[in-house]
Amino acid sequence: MTAERQNAGPGVFMKQRLIRVLPLYWIISAPLLISYIYKSISEKHFNIRFIRDNILLFPLWDKFAVAYPLLIVGWSLYFEMWFYVLFAILLIFISAKNVPFSIAGILLVFSSVAFLWNGTWHFPAFAFHPFCWEFAMGCIAYEISKSWSPSNLLPLYSMLALGLLLLIYTASHYESLGEAWITRESPSRSAIRSIIWGIPSFLIVLSSILFEKRGVSMHILSPLVYLGNASYAIYLIHLPAYSCIERYGPYIFKAGMIYSSLIFLVASIIAGVILHHFVEKPLTLFLRHRFISHSPKPVL
């Protein structure tokens, strides 16, 4: 939607995406990176490749495996950055309105590469990893939302209810598929994860967009919309927030799993909202004004 609205080519598209993703990531990961560099210098074990990947979030030249970043949640940003790069490359050759189906087709047609690749250059397996299927689902959801407007709301309520039920079932039965390195190192487990988490999310997102398209009032959900805008900041800060709680409030974990989880959830949301409101939002607006002049406002 952003690319079609702007119609400004791959350069502006990538600038918008980089401004959206990198500055806040750099700010939160800076203490970890500085500590790593200091330790590397003192131990005379300086890994420039690892530092580069932490800064650029694009492990293109890794020969054997993708090293997870110091801010561990950055592993998913590797895939997000690859999606943006692929999107921008396609914008060079085709119009923005033709990119979504093209990129979905590429990611799905070559999905077997992650399962079959045995070369020493790891990037092909990374580029078509099952996690990329979720980006393909997003592209397909956007195309459907452009061309389909149901005559009544029953299909949308059914789609939303099905998505929520599937999401609750998945969350209660397959939480283990969220385990970090185990899932990411196994294409088969990653494929299952992308399907059983991705399809419910696909149904929820698509039905919500179509509700808006039909003119259904969404004012009651405005707090969720605000949390959606702050979700990137919440995502980046939730593990540092957990570390602080674990270090300075060990008694919290003695309260039981449910209560400690709620405390952790609320603390992460509060920290993320503060970070979004006072850092991410003003910084993003400043950088857009500074580096992208005369361009329409992006969706996010």
Image: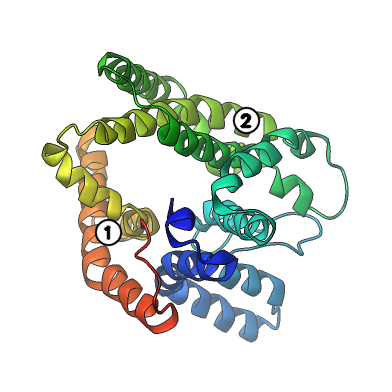
| Quarter of the image where the C terminus is located | bottom left
Q: Is residue 111 left or right of residue 210?
A: right
Q: Position of residue 12 (x, y in %)?
A: 51, 70
Front residue of 137 and 182: 137
> Which residue appears at 32% of the width and 79% of the height?
286
Q: Amino acid at mark 2?
A: Ala
Q: Secondary structure at mark 2?
A: helix
Is 244 situated above or below 286?
above
Q: Do the residues bearing badges 2 and 1 touch, measured as CB atoms within 8 Å?
A: no
- When asked about the image quadrant of residue 295, the answer is bottom left
* Helix, strand or loop status at disc 1: helix
Task: Indicate which disc residue 272 carries.
Answer: 1
Q: Residues within 10 Å of mark 1 (few under 14, many from 20)?
A: many
Whether residue 57 sits left or right of residue 129 in the image: it is: left
Q: Position of residue 175 (x, y in %)?
A: 44, 29
The disc at residue 191 is: 2
Q: Which mark is residue 134?
A: none
In this rendering, the answer to whether 73 lies above or below 54 is: above
* Residue at x 83% of width, y 55% of height: 121
Q: Relative to residue 28, is residue 46 depicted above or below?
A: below
Count of numbered circles on the image:
2
| Residue type at numbered disc 1 | Gly
